[in-house]
Amino acid sequence: MSEPGLVSLLIPAVGGQGGGVLSEWIVEAAALDGYRVHGTSIPGVAQRTGSTTYYVELVTDREAPDDPLFSLYPVPGALDVLLAPEFLEVGRMIEAGFVSPARTTVVCSTHRLYTIHEKIATGCGIYPTERLDAAARAFARKLIAFDALALAREHGTEANAVLLGALAGSGALPVAADAYREAIRAKGVQVDANLRGFEAGLAVATRSPAAPGPARASRGRAPCTRT
């Protein structure tokens, strides 16, 4: 953990991935479940050259007498949970030093949204999924990786709701599943659809941690082959 009695969580996202709503659900659920919690965001541009990161810290002891001193920023090597809405974000956070094999649970979607550099490259510029797969396996203490976007489309919902369910099922935070459900209801936006997504993600995570496989492209051009 970052500090004794604290759990830290980082969500790296770009525009349109629902990272802000995902962070708000987590903070609200923790508060509803009686935990002291703090969330903040570090804005970037809505392109892969500068994603927005959402950071949450939670005090695990509900009865702790002292007021916590929360940090606004994650500490490299001291992150407990990485919740990534897209597979390349896992690689970016590993490269930045946040993910540690000794402590970091990684919950992520394996689908890809291609970067500007991948799209404009002459020839094949797509970053190899196999390298992301290998890095995730090597650096995560526990890995739950699956195509959250495909699952969301199957259930008529959004990937962030699916990932919220996977986070709940991972056991990485002490927050009860019912508190997440109540946070979705309290938000009051597409409640039925988001609850469907939550249950789908919860089922995936509680059934067994999924190993990352070939990522499914959801936007941009199709993956190229090298010869």
Image (cartoon, rainbow, N blue to C red):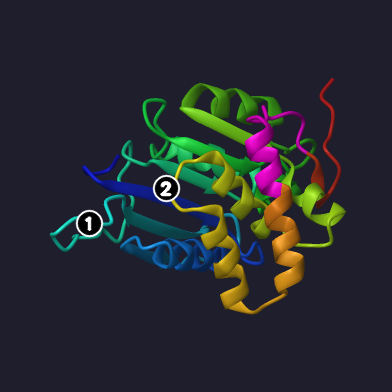
Residue type indicated by callout 2: Pro
Indicate whether residue 72 is drawn in magenta.
Answer: no
Q: Which residues are magenta?
A: 201-215
Residue tagged 2: 174
Q: Quadrant of residue 48?
A: bottom right
- Graded by Cα atoms within 10 Å as few (under 14), some (14 to 19) or many (20 or more), the crowding at tag 2 reads some
Q: Nearer the viewer, residue 110 or 166?
A: 166
Q: Residue at x 67, y 56 (%)?
A: 198
**Looking at the rendering, which quadrant does residue 208 occupy?**
top right
Q: Position of residue 100 (x, y in %)?
A: 39, 31
Instruction: Indicate the position of residue 136 as horizontal and vertical percent values.
Output: 56, 29
Q: Which label sits on residue 63? A: 1
Residues under labels 2 and 1: Cα distance? 14 Å
Q: Is 102 in front, or is 194?
A: 194
Q: Secondary structure at mark 1?
A: loop
Left of 57 or right of it: where is 197?
right
Left or right: residue 55 compared with residue 91: left
> Secondary structure under badge 2?
loop
Residue 3 in sight from this viewpoint: yes
Q: Position of residue 72 (x, y in %)?
A: 30, 61
Q: Quadrant of the N terminus?
A: top left
Q: Residue at x 54, y 68 (%)?
A: 20
For the image shown, how many numbered marks are present on the structure? 2
For marks 2 and 1, the one nearer the N-term is 1
In front: 210, or 220?
210
Of residues 179 and 212, the one nearer the viewer is 179
Residue 53, given in percent of the width and then of the height, sits at 46, 58
Q: Quadrant of the C terminus?
A: top right
Q: Which mark is residue 6?
A: none
Q: Residue furthest left?
A: 66
Looking at the rendered image, the disc whose residue lies closer to the viewer, 2 or 1, is: 1
Amino acid type, callout 1: Glu
